[in-house]
Image (cartoon, grey):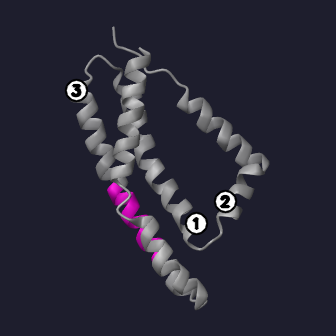
Amino acid sequence: MYGRYALVAALAVVFSACSTLGVNETVGRHGAILAAERDRTGLRRLLGSLLALRLGSGLATAVAFGILTTLWLRDLDRVALAAAALAVMVRGIWLALFAFFLGLNQAARWERASRSIAGRCRVAARRWCAASPVTTRR
């Protein structure tokens, strides 16, 4: 059972990595220039475009992850695999937001948000969801 969980978790990380499409590099290059020029409209447009790109690529990789794991790991619960596929998509959007903060040299704000009450609840929920077991169908 734990080997299956490790396999699903590893596949989720690989598929999430495949959906990055160079967002960190794009924000690091163009976001810093727009921030130095104080171009808020350009930053909003860049963030909107990157979020749309990551939503599309995250959705595509989540669908591919769901199809692959459903066909390959037939004995695992489909609901658990669907939850893992959803996590692949959400992680893509989440990392795009982090890349935006990182590219604008504002990563400290991201860390500060995790120290608040809501941030601590978010971190605790993420840890509990990561520890959820992958069950087999009977």
Label 1 crowd (10 A; few <14 / some 14-19 / many >=20)? some
| 134 relative position to 66: left or right | right
- Type of amino acid at the residue the image marks with label 3: Trp
Q: Amino acid at mark 2?
A: Trp
Q: Which residue is mark 1?
A: 102
107 vs 123: above or below: below
Going from the N terminus, do you reach mark 1 or mark 3 first?
3
Which residue corresponds to mark 2? 110
Q: Which of marks 2 and 1 precedes in the sequence? A: 1
Residue 82, quarter of picture: top left
Q: What's the residue at 64%, 63% (across, down)?
A: 107
Image quarter in which the C terminus is found: top left
Q: Residue at x 62, y 71 (%)?
A: 105
- The residue wearing badge 3 is 72
Residue 85 in view: no
Marks 1 and 2, Cα distance to the nearest angstrom?
9 Å
**Relative side of 39 to 60, left or right:** right
Start and end of the magenta stretch? 46-57
Q: Position of residue 60 (x, y in %)?
A: 29, 51
Residue 14 location (% of width, % of height): 35, 43
Residue 62 drawn above or below residue 107: above
Regarding mark 3 in the picture, which secondary structure is present there?
Answer: helix
Callout 1 secondary element = helix
Residue 108 or residue 41, whichever sits in front: 108
